[in-house]
Image: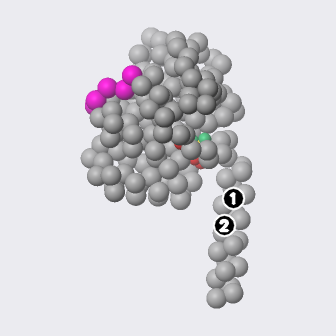
Amino acid sequence: MLYLGIALGAVTLGLIWWNLTLDALWQPTDRVTVRRILSLAGVKPGETVVDLGCGDGRIVVAAAREFGARAVGVEIDPFRALLGKTWIRLAGLSDRARIVWGDMYKFDLSQADIVILFLSGKANKKLEGKLASELRPGARVVSYFHPLYGFTPTEIRGSKRGEPLFLYRMGG
Ligand SMILES: C[S@@+](CC[C@H](N)C(=O)[O-])C[C@H]1O[C@@H](n2cnc3c(N)ncnc32)[C@H](O)[C@@H]1O
């Protein structure tokens, strides 16, 4: 029993340390802001929404349930990815929502109509080239809090607490 406790403690500490090495730490978006993000993106039924770094999948669930989107979340942390998968199943949304456990920098964005980001300045900087090369013209990106310095926002609104929500439209 003691060894099990030590092993569990070591795994937990290892996970916490590993999370600190990620380009973006987990901070869930509040419900009001989730809706503002999806409204600003102008999500329409049937559109494909991708949340890069989806945490527990709350934006994915809301996009599918409240906006009728096909929603995909990409999350590198196995526990949060599992939480998101479970939530989708419990909500009965498995036909149009899914979570991919993996690295967002390697996820193919060519099918996305809309990409949601709530990450960090560093992660956004690293993603700019990928967004520009993989997204089709007219695709939209909403970034919560952190701008994409390589693009000009078409609109800026506020989150529940007043932080910026940046909307970008990919050019041709
Ligand atoms: C600020 S949280 C945002 C969570 C969610 N999008 C929301 O708004 O509630 C950032 C998330 O990005 C994830 N993340 C960081 N680096 C990642 C990577 N390379 N690939 C996939 N997810 C990553 C973190 O594990 C964390 O859950």
Q: Is residue 149 above or below residue 36?
A: above
Query: Camera-side residue: 146 or 72?
Result: 146
Give the residue type that dot 1 points to: Ile
Q: Quadrant of ligand 1?
A: top right
Reading the image, the residue beneath label 1 is 16
Q: Position of residue 20 (x, y in %)?
A: 72, 51
Q: Determine whether 146 is above or below 91 in the image.
A: above
Where does the image place residue 84, in percent across and percent down from the top left?
45, 52
Contact between labelled residues 2 and 1, with CB atoms less than 8 Å apart: yes
Question: Residue at point 39% right, 22% down?
Answer: 42
Segment colored magenta: 42-46
Label 2 lies in ligand 1 vicinity (Cβ under 8 Å): no
- Element class at badge 1: helix
Whether residue 151 is in magenta: the answer is no
Q: Is residue 51 above or below residue 136?
A: below
Location of mark 2 (residue): 12
Dividing the image into 4 quarters, which one contains the C terminus?
A: top left
Which residue type carries mark 2? Thr
Q: Is 29 positioned to the left or the right of 120 in the image? A: left
- The residue shown at (38%, 36%) is 63
Cα distance in 3D space between marks 1 and 2: 6 Å
Disc 2: CA contacts within 10 A as few (<14), some (14-19) or many (>=20) = few
Q: Which mark is residue 110?
A: none
Q: Answer whether residue 28 is visible to the viewer in this image.
A: yes
Q: Is residue 41 left or right of residue 104?
A: left
Residue 88 image offset from top left, x and y in percent: 36, 51
Instruction: Tell me: residue 52, above or below residue 20.
Output: above
Q: Main secondary structure of the magenta part?
A: loop
